[in-house]
Image (spheres, rainbow, N blue to C red):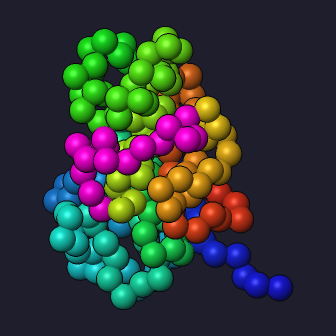
Amino acid sequence: MSEKKIFELWLTSPERILNRMKCENRHSVSVSEYFISSVLKTKLADFSPDQIYKNEHGKPVLSDSALSFNISHSGNNLAMILCEQKFCGVDIQIAEKRNRFDDALKSVLTDREFAHLETRGSDDDFFRLWSLKEAYIKAIGSSIWYGRDYDFMPILDQYCEKWTFCNNLFLYSTEIDKGIFLSISVPEKPDIIDFKKY
């Protein structure tokens, strides 16, 4: 029997991390840096922040390790994916009133995606797709402003709460709380997602 690969999704809030940082008197790092280091130390006993570098696209990468990670935050939510895959992407997004973001959404979604979602009329649908595109683009190491280059039209009605395959990656999207969407993008479909509370 083969050993299951690490595939963990960590969820927390900035307040929880700040409280831990205060207890440890750690003020020289950001909330994100502290969160990343704390999670990586759960798997790498000899972890050092010096092992993290930014690749050519500015994406943080862990050197000399089979693990990859990605982090996202929105409002009072922080998410981090940690897995034994070549790369990964995660995004957490709070749905808001879409009309405030129409210009941004039109610059990220393809015309077909935008038109399809317009007929549904749900702000949640727009922000769920934004989250999925963000996770995908973070996985490949690009920028959300290139979102129009990737068409998710073939999976628009089927990617919620299950793994789907599109544009050469596996995608998963779920609503972790009312109006808070979490999306993951990876090259290999995992056996299971191990949800962790920080």
Position of residue 145 measured from the top left corner of the image (x, y, whole percent) = 23, 43
Say if the magenta span includes residue 143. Answer: yes
Residue found at x 16% / y 59%: 28
Query: Depth check: 189 or 153 in front?
Result: 153
Residue found at x 57% / y 41%: 155
Query: Depth check: 121 or 197 in front?
Result: 121
Query: Depth check: 8 or 40 in front?
Result: 8
Say whether residue 103 is visible: yes
Please state if 134 lies on the left or on the right of 183 as rendered: left
Q: In this view, does 82 lie above or below 18?
A: below
Outermost residue on the right side: it is 1
Say if the magenta span includes residue 125. Answer: no
Tell me the magenta residue range: 141-156
Position of residue 92 measured from the top left corner of the image (x, y, whole percent) = 43, 40
Outermost residue on the front side: it is 112
Residue found at x 71% / y 65%: 191
